[in-house]
Image (cartoon, helix red, strand yellow):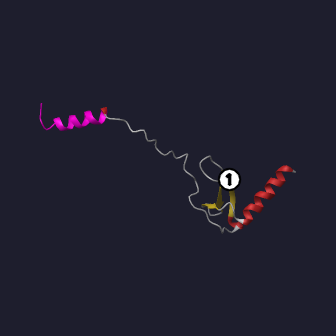
Amino acid sequence: MDFKLLPLMLLLAVVTHGPTCTAKPISLVERCWCRSTINTVPQRSIKELKFLHTPNCPFQVIAKLKSNREVCINPETKWLQQYLKNAINNQVN
């Protein structure tokens, strides 16, 4: 046996028979879509609003603008709160 190959085989034996790691990879599903939010978006530039609520993330509002850019809006914004309130009232009536 070639003695240059012995350290490589020893390393492979240790790696394959060593303890396995118990850490779990971070899933893309568990990541929040909105990492930061903005407070000021001209309402007339919004084409579409999406609302996301996942178990590991707070309530998220994503606005698709007429320029096809998507931005995250702060859910505490006054006009957005009024919009949601009106939408809920319309659903009840």
Residue lying at the far right of the rendered structure: 93
Disc 1 target residue = 51
- The answer to whether residue 61 is above or below residue 54 is below
Question: Magenta includes 6?
Answer: yes
- Give the residue drawn at x 67%, y 54%: 50
Residue toward you, 11 or 87: 11
Residue lying at the far top of the rendered structure: 1
- The answer to whether residue 79 is above or below residue 27 is below
- The answer to whether residue 60 is above or below residue 77 is above
Residue 82: % across, % down: 77, 62
State the extent of the magenta-drawn residues as a range.
1-16
Query: Which quarter of the figure has residue 60?
Result: bottom right
Residue 43: % across, % down: 71, 66
Residue 68: % across, % down: 61, 60
The three-letter amino acid code for the residue at tag 1 is: Phe
Image quadrant in which the N terminus is located: top left
- Give the residue drawn at x 66%, y 67%: 41
Q: Callout 1: 10 Å neighbours few (<14), some, many (20+)?
A: few
Dot 1 falls on a residue whose secondary structure is: strand
- The answer to whether residue 73 is above or below residue 92 is below
* Left or right: 29, with 83 as reference point: left
Q: How many badges with numbers are in the image?
A: 1
- Dominant SS type (magenta): helix
* Left or right: 54, with 17 as reference point: right
Question: Magenta includes 80?
Answer: no
